Amino acid sequence: MTCRTAGILFLLLLVTKTLPANAEPLAGNLSKVPSADHHVTDNQTREAYTQPFADLTNAELAQFFRGRSLFRQSWVIAPASGTAVGLGPLYNRIACVSCHLKNGRGRAPDNAHERLQSMLVRLSVPGTTLHGAPKPHLRYGNQFNEEGIPGVPGEGRVQIHWQYHKVTFADGTIIRLRKPQLHFSELHYGTLHEQQPLLTSARIGPVVYGLGLLEAVDENELQTLAQQPKPDGVTGNLNRVWDIASQQIRHGRFGAKANVASLRSQIAEAMHGDLGITSTLLPQENCQPQQTACLHAARGGTPELTDEQLTDLEFYLRYLAVPTRRHRNDPQVKAGEKIFIETGCAVCHRTELRTAKNYPHKHLADLRIHPYTDLLLHDMGEGLADNRPDFQATGREWRTSPLWGIGLTAFISEYQAYLHDGRAQSLTEAILWHGGEAQTARERYRHLSQQNRDVLEQFLLSL
């Protein structure tokens, strides 16, 4: 789907040791999954992120697999026959799965010569739209699209250049961190910098399992979490955003800055921004006024993604199960969980949330879930800042990223790329980038012994 995506592990989706493709992560016995936990899966293969809820009916499973087919479908250029027609005119990738391989996360290029395969760059200029969203760039819109269909030039190219610096642990261990710098070239629609300053934010594709559960979390609980006093200078805010599906202001909970309120809106925005596919929610092509060839290109339908297809995609992503925790009773895992709490990680990566009792989708109602997030915005300091506001989120604020399922990340993805822009290539790197509200917790981590850092990792590998 989209290439889009506190305490000490905010936005942390990681493991630090890549397992061979034929290995089983953390060898040992799985905990038995209670029958009521229909929203988790004990699958530990490379398809662990693609499993449906356990209690779906045959008819529901059929809809789930229709949505899965659309998620994996490569869209084609109009005119053509078929059910996936209308790619572009401007786009980044040809399928949702291109940025979410096996429903996992994307990665950043290793160098300036490598293309953005599962990463995108958001654009804006100072100011907001009528509904408070970031103000799009006049020539290039709110997302840089590198690709175009025949006859429509892509917007240009983005190269990633890495800047490095070193951080030292209390025990003398030295870690090198990297930060991306963006360079735009081959621009086909004029300068990017005529409107100053240009605001950019690079994003790798996030994981997509568990989204239905996050949408079902009781809004009253999130409001309570935001208002609760917290230690270590931690606060936490809800973003208020314009929801294109309901046509009203709602609390955001999806996206790296909690800038999308509903799963249906997230899908429609991703299809439109990343693949150039229109829907009834976003019926106009993603062309700017000066992009005349884009404006006159053939369309694949009106809209190109039907309401039925959008509903099937929504159903698929709503009912993707979450990998169950493993090795709960392992002494190292228990010790790591204790360190996770003592260092302050769990202040924002909350161990439990509750879905709404009256949630309209019965499979998701009144559940205790363990996503390790509070879904709130936190100021993460200047090191992680993109300086690009998004609705009420400031340029230093990010949503606490869920940690569930991270123990299978390297096994499934076969690479490591963490935080919103993929800069961190290990657990240690991701933690050390955290500042702002997470600075106290980060410093506790920096003063841990190597043994305790390893134990903390074992806990994360169990999630």
Image (tube, helix red, strand yellow):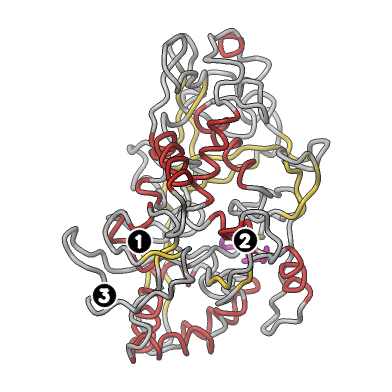
Whether residue 181 is in magenta: the answer is: no
Which residue corresponds to mark 3? 26
Q: Residues within 10 Å of mark 1 (few under 14, many from 20)?
A: many
Position of 8 compared to 424: left or right? right
Quadrant for residue 134, please give it.
top right
Q: Amino acid at mark 1?
A: Thr
**Magenta stretch, residue numbers:** 375-385
Q: How many numbered circles are shown? A: 3
Give the distance between the C-alpha atoms of the residues marked 2 and 1, in whole angstroms. 20 Å
Which residue corresponds to mark 2? 399
- For the stretch drawn in magenta, what is the main secondary structure? loop
The one of 188 and 245 positioned closer to us in this rendering: 245
Which residue corresponds to mark 1? 409
Q: Amino acid at mark 2?
A: Arg
- Which one is earlier in the sequence, the residue at label 3 or at label 1? 3
Give the distance between the C-alpha atoms of the residues marked 3 and 2, in whole angstroms. 29 Å
In this rendering, is residue 422 above or below 365? above
In this rendering, is residue 18 above or below 167? above
SS category of the residue bearing label 3: loop
Residue 85 rendering spot, x and y as whole percentages:
46, 19
